[in-house]
Image: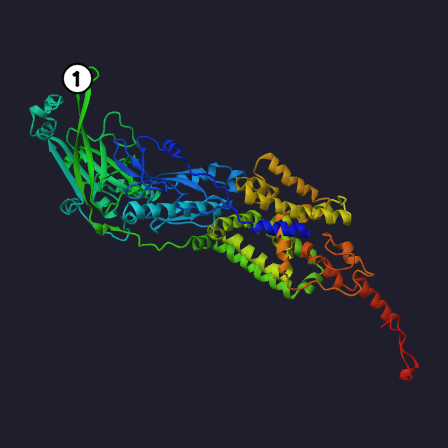
């Protein structure tokens, strides 16, 4: 075993560079930019490219995260992501290029990871983006924007999220002169004013744009379409466009302009579409609002909007509109729509914006030529109706993760706070309980269900191997903080190294170990015969796990791109992380060890677990011998050795602490005067000892009896 230990330590500290995947080439990036956008020239050595719009003008930036923010994932290699930003710092697209995260490579599959990145579109780098989890949530108007995490892969998506933000903010500082302004305003529900239609008009809360036939004729003057609207020529003073526009987000404005029934319908709509800002448009002249081909609940073909030089996406809200009875009669006879625009896409209702109406003419009878001009209506709603989220100080990734897992962390901490003192200060009392075995099995069931399947706290050799690769490449160990639940288990395991060796984690906190031990007891209930591996074979088989650990370290050092596959020697991902929802061969491998556990006690833990090998090496930090022994243990008594399912007691009676799983069975025997042979013999001898009478020197008991 010593040569294997030395080999593992040597490989552990061997300085070599990890073989990371190369960043995507310019050709690969160009293929990922979809029309009408295209990839422009490279702007910097760290791979920032110019984004061009359909006219070839500068429209944003394209970059990869790996060259700019190479945060190591759990494989040790960075997650490389393509990010496309517009000039205001909004995410136009986020795509996964390359990664080596084990949970997605051969666990959950790639689809959930790709779906996670789709959520960034439309958000700004100035938004307070938070990765939500099945344990957390968020609310509209809180200033926080929650991205749905991926169950069972929280740490990986947090690392990816931090890579995106780190790279995007770097681009903002270098190329944009800062960061886009904060989140947009939204209607303030506390503002409740009793307005009339006339007051709304007088205060500029409803904007009106009129264009006469003569004015539209002037706009087409000198073009081939100049003579294609006889009505505009014959009636120059008649209105061509009479457009009324109002923001219906503030409730006070909506009540002043709409009927009660329409207000109720609008309230229902905004309660569902919480990020949409409703816009009322009315047209009473001959232009109209939409073409005959318009389909409800789609983008209007003749109406557009812009703010700050950037387009605003409009869409029909598909609501029946009835105006307030105080509205002018001609408006009741006009064409009315309620459009919606998403504030998350950059629309700020408290800032000035422009609605553009397209006027179209056709020239020719067959295959006519189409020409158009744009009519602009400016709108600015008083800011008193809106509120802006207070600037949210973004928590660190570790703080965000703790907040998301707060309840689980509290429960885990309580469990550890009970278990550790109990094992440290009252292990003999615990082992001496008549119901010790049911108590232990119940605890292991909780570990399997809560720590394993629910909390995803199954420790894996992947984490120390990723730490090794990070140390070799001089990277950041911040990835260890992205899963505080597992980190707390790691802390407990490391404390256990000092107090008990590997026994605390392997015997009490490992979900897969708990599953194997429960399988063993199921086998006993089913009266399945067990096979006790002969000791000389057992001792040789136990060395396999050190060879497995050394092999994984070698793969990490020399061929890290294969580490995720090599780590599949652990069935943890299959049995615990994905709950057996994987490819059949992974399920068969995990099931093989569990079925074997019916016959051979915890075979994987004892013989092949590379994490167990690392735990055993770490167990050399143990500062005490915590299992009580008597001089008779081993000679002549061999009961504890025979009863030890782990084969962790030598012929001499000494405890082999690097193989001890802290099951406490030998402690139970040691303290039980009905099981411990030396105690039984002592009790019998005390009963046989003669009573002493008369002078003290008349008789002296034998030393053997004493």
Vertical placement of residue 410 versus 173, above or below = below
- Label 1: few (<14), some (14–19) or many (≥20) C-alpha neighbours in 10 Å: few
On the image, the x and y values in percent for residue 390 come to 31, 54
On the image, the x and y values in percent for residue 623 come to 64, 64
On the image, the x and y values in percent for residue 195 come to 19, 48
On the image, the x and y values in percent for residue 196 come to 17, 46
Q: Which type of secondary structure does the marked residue at label 1 adopt?
A: loop
Instruction: Classify residue 445 as left or right of residue 49.
Output: right
Between residue 308 and residue 336, name the one nearer to us: 308
Single out the residue that lies furthest toward the front.
Answer: 15
Instruction: Classify residue 68 as left or right of residue 311.
Output: right
Snapshot colouring: rainbow
Between residue 676 and residue 541, name the one nearer to us: 541
Q: Disc 1 marks which residue?
A: 364
Instruction: Classify residue 561 as left or right of residue 171.
Output: right
Q: Is residue 286 visible?
A: yes
């Amino acid at each position: 075993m010593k040569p294997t230990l030395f080999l593992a330590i040597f490989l552990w500290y061997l300085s070599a560079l990890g073989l990371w995947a190369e960043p995507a080439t310019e050709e690969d990036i160009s293929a990922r930019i979809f029309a009408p956008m295209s990839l422009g020239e490279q702007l910097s050595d760290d791979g920032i490219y110019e984004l061009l719009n359909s006219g070839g003008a500068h429209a944003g930036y394209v970059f990869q995260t790996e060259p700019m923010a190479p945060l190591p994932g759990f494989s040790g290699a960075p997650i490389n992501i393509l990010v496309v930003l517009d000039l205001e710092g909004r995410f136009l697209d986020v795509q996964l290029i390359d990664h080596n995260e084990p949970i997605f490579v051969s666990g959950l599959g790639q689809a959930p990871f790709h779906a996670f990145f789709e959520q960034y579109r439309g958000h700004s780098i100035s938004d307070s983006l938070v990765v939500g989890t099945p344990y957390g949530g968020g609310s509209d108007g809180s200033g926080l924007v929650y991205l749905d995490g991926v169950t069972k892969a929280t740490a990986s998506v947090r690392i990816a999220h931090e890579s995106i933000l780190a790279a995007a903010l770097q681009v903002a500082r270098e190329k944009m002169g800062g960061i886009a302004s904060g989140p947009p305003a939204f209607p303030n529900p506390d503002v409740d004013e009793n307005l009339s239609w006339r007051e709304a008009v007088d205060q500029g809360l409803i904007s009106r744009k009129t264009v006469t036939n003569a004015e539209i004729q002037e706009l087409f003057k000198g073009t081939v379409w100049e003579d294609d609207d006889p009505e505009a020529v014959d009636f120059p003073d008649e209105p061509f466009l009479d457009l009324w526009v109002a923001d219906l987000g503030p409730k006070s404005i909506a009540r002043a302009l709409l009927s009660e029934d329409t207000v109720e319908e609008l309230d229902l709509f905004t309660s569902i579409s919480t990020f949409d800002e409703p816009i009322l448009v009315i047209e009473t002249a001959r232009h109209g609002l939409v073409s005959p081909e318009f389909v409800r609940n789609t983008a209007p073909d003749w109406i557009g909007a812009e703010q700050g030089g950037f387009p605003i996406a409009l869409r029909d809200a598909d609501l029946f509109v009835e105006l307030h009875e105080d509205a002018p009669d001609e408006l009741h006879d006009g064409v009315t729509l309620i459009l919606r625009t998403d504030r998350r896409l950059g629309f700020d209702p408290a800032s000035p914006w422009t609605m553009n109406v397209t006027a179209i003419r056709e020239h020719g009878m067959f295959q006519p030529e189409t020409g158009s001009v744009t009519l602009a209506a400016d709108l600015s709603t008083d800011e008193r109706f809106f509120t802006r989220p207070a600037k949210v100080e973004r928590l660190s990734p570790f703080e965000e993760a703790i907040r998301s897992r707060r309840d689980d962390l509290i429960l885990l901490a309580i469990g550890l706070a009970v278990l550790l003192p109990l094992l440290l200060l009252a292990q003999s009392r615990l082992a001496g309980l008549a119901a010790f075995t049911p108590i232990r099995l119940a605890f292991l069931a909780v570990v399997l269900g809560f720590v394993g399947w629910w909390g995803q706290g199954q420790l894996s050799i992947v984490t120390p191997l990723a730490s090794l690769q990070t140390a070799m490449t001089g990277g950041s160990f911040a990835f260890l903080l992205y899963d505080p639940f597992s980190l707390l288990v790691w802390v407990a395991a490391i404390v256990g190294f000092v107090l008990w060796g590997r026994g605390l984690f392997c015997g009490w906190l490992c979900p897969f170990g708990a599953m194997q031990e429960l399988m063993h007891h199921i086998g006993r209930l089913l009266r399945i015969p067990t096979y006790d591996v002969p000791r000389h074979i057992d001792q040789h088989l136990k060395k396999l796990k050190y060879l497995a650990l050394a092999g994984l370290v070698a793969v990490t050092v020399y061929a890290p791109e294969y580490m995720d596959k090599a780590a599949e020697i652990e069935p943890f991902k299959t049995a615990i992380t994905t709950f057996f929802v994987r490819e059949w061969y992974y399920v068969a491998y995990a099931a093989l060890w569990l079925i074997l556990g019916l016959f051979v006690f915890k075979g994987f833990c004892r013989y092949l677990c590379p994490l167990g090998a690392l735990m055993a090496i770490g167990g050399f930090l143990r500062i005490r011998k915590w299992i009580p022994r008597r001089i008779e243990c081993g000679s002549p008594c061999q009961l504890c050795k025979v009863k030890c399912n782990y084969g962790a007691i030598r012929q001499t009676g000494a405890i082999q602490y690097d193989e001890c799983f802290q099951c406490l069975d030998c402690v139970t025997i040691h303290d039980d005067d009905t099981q411990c042979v030396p105690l039984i013999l002592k009790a019998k001898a005390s009963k046989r000892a003669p009573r002493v009478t008369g002078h003290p020197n008349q008789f002296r008991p034998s030393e053997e009896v004493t």
